Structures are given as structure tokens and as C-alpha cells.
Image: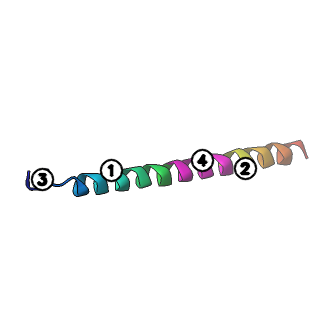
Amino acid sequence: MIFNSTNSPIKLIKIIYIIQCCIYYFYYYKLLFIYMSTKKTYKNFKKN
């Protein structure tokens, strides 16, 4: 309730939250990409 007079702390929390979300999505897609590529190479390996 101390920060009720100003909006800056709330904005900061929102910004931090958004940045965290972006980082999580980035890592999720990176891992997904790595998983897909390893799956592909595994299939190719099985063929040979």
C-alpha cells in the first residue's frame, strides 16, 4: 500500500514479468528446436 501513490513500482514489476516471459518462451522454443533436430538425426541414424 506504500506504492499506491506512484505507478512506477507496478510498471517495473510488469516490465520484469514481460521480460521473464520472453526469456522463458525463447528457451522453450530453443529446447523444442534442439529436440526436433535431435529427433531428425536419430531417425537418419536409424535408417543407416
| Residue 38: numbered disc | 2
Q: Nearer the viewer, residue 10 or 26?
A: 10
**In the rendered structure, which disc, 1 or 3, sits on the residue that comes first in sequence?**
3
Per the image, the residue denoted by label 4 is 29
What residue sits 55% from the left and 48% below the top?
28
Please, which colouring scheme is shown? rainbow
Per the image, the residue denoted by label 1 is 14
| Residues packed near mark 2 inside 10 Å, few (<14), some (14 to 19) or many (20 plus) | few
Where does residue 5 sit, x and y in percent of width and height? 12, 53
Asked which secondary structure carries label 3, the reply is loop
Asked which secondary structure carries label 1, the reply is helix
- The span shown in magenta is 25-34
**Residues at badges 3 and 2 in contact (C-beta under 8 Å)?**
no
Which three-letter amino acid code belongs to the residue tagged 1? Lys
**In the rendered structure, which disc, 4 or 3, sits on the residue that comes first in sequence?**
3
Distance from Cα at disc 1 to Cα at disc 2: 36 Å
Please tell me whether residue 30 belongs to the stretch shown in magenta: yes
Which three-letter amino acid code belongs to the residue tagged 2? Thr
Distance from Cα at disc 4 to Cα at disc 3: 39 Å
| Residue 5: numbered disc | 3
Which three-letter amino acid code belongs to the residue tagged 4? Tyr
